[in-house]
Image (cartoon, rainbow, N blue to C red):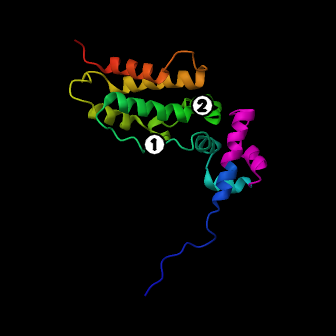
Amino acid sequence: MSEPHRRLGRPRDTRIDERALEAARVLLIERGFEATTIQAVASRSGVHSSAIYRRWPSRVELIEEAAFPGFSFAGIVPSGDLRRDLRRFIRAYVAAFSAPAARAAAAGLLAHHRKPNHVAQSEVYPRMSVRPLFEDILRAAPPGSVDPTVDPDDVFDMLLGAILTRTVVFTPTSRQRPIERTVEMIVRLLRPAD
């Protein structure tokens, strides 16, 4: 009977990952995007920079994982109830971008990925892309509730702009029920013309 294949070397120490990510979050909040370097994270966490580079090839990838650790829409399965699905989708985005480290990292990450000659966004964020889920939500909506001539990418961009404005750019307004207001705005954009 053959033995199961074993990896050579020591098992990966997840405590190193946790220490580096926590140090990156603290640095983002205290000192900002530009000051959150691999060297600063190494110094703050007590983790050698070579161990950090083995886990994250660049500081941007480290910052992305630190700032958006739970950026997951895995639990959102389109139900066919457009308002309910939009509400859950928006709440997941708001939760991801409302964390202090995410707010501190957002502008720097956006600027980094907007540099000339940079890899296309679809190639940069495949693990974070939720456009397909948004399109699934629209496809699952009741017949006649979504105008087929409306470009889902345009609506998604408007939705993301509203979310980022409320969570990153401005402090929350005194308006009541901002998520419900955003859901209503998106439903109006999607509604077929009379």
Point 43% across, 88% down: residue: 1
Q: Is residue 147 left or right of residue 171?
A: left
Front position in the image: 170 or 83:
83
Q: Residues within 10 Å of mark 2 (few under 14, many from 20)?
A: many
- Give percent across and percent down for residue 109: 59, 33
Question: Could you tell me the amino acid type at mark 2?
Answer: Ala
- The answer to whether residue 36 shows anywhere in this view is no
Residue at left 38%, top 19%?
184
Q: Residue furthest front?
A: 176
Q: Give residue 34's position: percent from left, percent from top.
A: 70, 33
**Residue at 70% from the left image edge and 56% from the top image edge:** 50
The image shows residue 9 at horizontal and vertical percentages of 62, 71
Q: Which residues are magenta?
A: 21-47
Magenta highlight on residue 25: yes
**Label number found at residue 126:** 1
User: Mark number for residue 106?
Assistant: 2
State which mark lies toward you, 1 or 2.
2
Q: Determine whether the residue tagged by mark 1 lies in a helix, strand or loop.
A: loop
Taking depth in this image into account, of 80 and 122 the one nearest to the observer is: 80
Q: Earlier in the sequence, mark 1 or mark 2?
A: 2
